[in-house]
Image: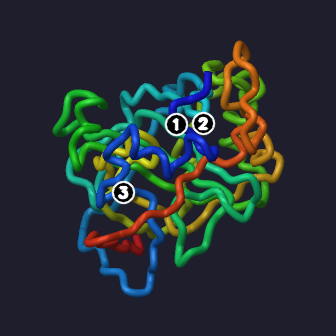
Amino acid sequence: MTLEWGYNQENGPEKWCQSYPAAAGTRQSPIDIRPVDLKSLNTNAKLTWKYVPENTREVCNPGYGWKVGVDGKGSELNGGPLEGVYVLEQFHCHWGKTNDEGSEHTINGQKFAGELHLVHWNTTKYLSFDEAAKQPDGLAVLGVFLKPGKKHLELEKVVAQLSKIQFRGESAKILQPINPGEFLPENSGYYTYHGSLTTPPCSECVIWIVFKEPVEVSEEQLKEFRSLRCYSNKDSCPCDEFKGFVKSNFRPTLPLGQREVKECRQ
């Protein structure tokens, strides 16, 4: 059984709007960020975050990458462009078949090897993640670019479990506490704009905060990402261009339209 959506020629991003009408909307993500003519974000509230490392629960393979589920209790993201308190729901990653592509957002057309997404929801206004995901200010996603370099020690705690979730539908407990704050680049400014989830249903419910500075991950870690499969071990391998591996799981950039991107030099 193949996924109803994915990243190959048959079920890739250009087909998503057939099943998910929001994917054809005017406030879609990702976008190409052009820093030349950005307005500054006027805020006195510094973007702050705190996480509870012991609350990372398990990593799973939903068929299009890896995703780490989190008990958001005790976590907190606020300030910057956000009103209210947002808590962490999960984090996941996007990458490409080679190191010269893989990020979803781009900067002046420049692509990175990957992009980590930390997905939070607005607990000040909404009672659940599902309710928040239907509102324009419901979710806040931190985007972090990945570039090849030295091994990322905190991320290695996820990578160490990937051999247990090679096939779609598999999951594994996270054995060591993970501090998602360690994924965020130090002293980095960020870009912010209103957009959407970058995977179906592509709901336009996200305040995006994309950090300017990339963080380093090793070649080996990127190779481990690409070793995941998009089918379950009960199914036969789909004869797609990636032979069933999740080699490339990023959505191409979409038009900014009438939206504004703001910059914070924090």
Q: Residue at x 36, y 81 (%)?
A: 38
**Name of the residue lying farthest toward the left:** 125
In which quadrant will I find the N terminus? Answer: top right
- For the residues carrying marks 2 and 1, which lies nearer the camera in this image? 1
Indicate left or right for 207 with 66 as reference. Answer: left
Indicate left or right for 257 with 52 as reference. Answer: left
Amino acid on which disc 1 is placed: Trp
**Name of the residue lying farthest toward the right:** 220
21 vs 261, nearest the viewer: 21
Image disc number at residue 189:
none
Q: Return the residue at label 2.
A: 64
Q: Residue at x 39, y 37 (%)?
A: 19
In which quadrant will I find the C terminus? Answer: bottom left
Mark 2 or 1 closer to N-term? 1
**Name of the residue lying farthest toward the bottom:** 36
Q: Taking 86 as reference, is 162 above or below it?
A: above
Q: Report helix, strand or loop for mark 2.
A: loop
Image disc number at residue 5:
1
131 vs 76, nearest the viewer: 131
Horizontal and vertical percent for residue 107? 53, 73
Image disc number at residue 28:
3
Q: Report helix, strand or loop for mark 1.
A: loop
Horizontal and vertical percent for residue 127? 20, 28
Q: Report helix, strand or loop for mark 3.
A: loop
Q: CA distance from mark 3 to mark 1?
A: 17 Å
Mark 3 or 1 closer to N-term? 1
Q: CA distance from mark 2 to mark 1?
A: 9 Å
Say which quarter of the image contains residue 179: top right
185 vs 241, nearest the viewer: 241
